Image (spheres, rainbow, N blue to C red):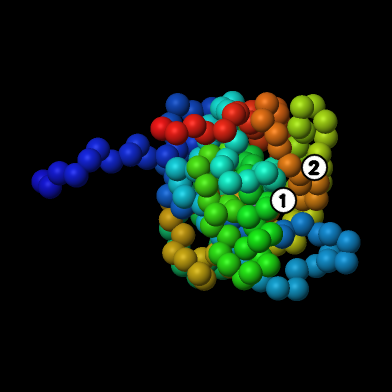
Amino acid sequence: MSEFVFAPPAIPSVAVAGSSQRFPVHCIYCVSHNYATPGREISSEPPVFFMKPADAIVANGAAVPYPSRTTNCQHEIELVVALGRKGRDISERQALEHVFGYAVGIDLTRRDLQRSAKQWGQPWDAAKAFEGSAPVAAIRPAALGHVSQGRIWLTVNGELRQESDVKHMLWDVRHIIAELSTLYEVRPGDLVFCGTPAGVGAVRRGDRLEGGVEGLEVLRITIGSARGPD
Ligand code: MN
């Protein structure tokens, strides 16, 4: 057996509610612009996907270091779908058979870098795919029910910032999985962040963020000081 040139990193994983087993993360896909806003109540275009590295996962209860190169890091509370079965070109009818479970996540975003990227037609990676950018609470297995509606909310230091219902997603979970699987072969371990409702805003060092989706474990993180040199 060949040896690695250095010790490989641990496999990123997420807790599973009611279990001592963990969900090993493969890819993190994210959907942008998935809630109705005034003037845009229906989905006229297919969803746009971007990715985060699997090790951007942050455990529930942890502190996320304030990221570098931004003065406008923002919270986006999202329903997260965890996939448990691989597939390509999955039909909407069969899409839920690929779901392992559901969780609450925050898509942390360096908004200033995203705005600049949009302006210049550049990739979003630096805005979206940084260390600590994907806090996720425990996954509730789909055996306990699929999520097609329910309140989604986020508070900062106890003050309500985001509130909607996941039934207002422009593309529902079935459609997102079907569409995603035409672009990529989805795998067990994939997570899909389903987009955020209105009310996104900047976070500051020391902020306490709490967010939830009805029926799922509440996600709580704090924003720590800037990451120092390792
Ligand atoms: Mn998002």
Asked if the beta carbon under badge 1 is closer than 8 A to the nearest atom of ligand 1, the reply is yes
| Badge count | 2
Residue 116 in view (yes/no): yes
Q: In the image, which disc is placed on residue 162?
A: 2
Locate the C terminus and report the quarter of the image it occupies.
top left
Q: Residue at x 81, y 46 (%)?
A: 199
Residue under circle 1?
Answer: 196
Q: Position of residue 227 (x, y in %)?
A: 52, 33
Q: Quadrant of residue 215?
A: top right
Which residue shows up at 72% across the image and 59% down it? 34
Mark 1 vs mark 2: which is more N-terminal? 2
**Quick one: SS at disc 1?**
loop
Using the image, determine if residue 158 lies above or below residue 201.
above
Q: Is residue 226 left or right of residue 118?
A: left
Residue 40, percent from left and from top: 83, 66
The image quadrant of residue 13 is top left
Residue type pointed to by label 2? Gln
Most extreme residue toward the bottom is 44
Does residue 58 lie above or below 172 as drawn? above
Element type at marker 2?
Answer: strand
In this image, 208 relative to 94: left or right?
Answer: right
Residue at the image point whose x is 56% and y is 27% from the top: 62
The dot on residue 140 is none
Q: Residue 123 lies in what quarter of the image?
A: bottom right
The residue that appears at 57% across and 33% down in the rendered structure is 226
x then y, percent, for residue 214? 73, 37
Q: CA distance from mark 1 to mark 2?
A: 9 Å
Are the residues at dot 1 and dot 2 in contact (C-beta closer than 8 Å)? yes
Q: Quick one: 103 or 37, which is closer to the camera?
A: 37
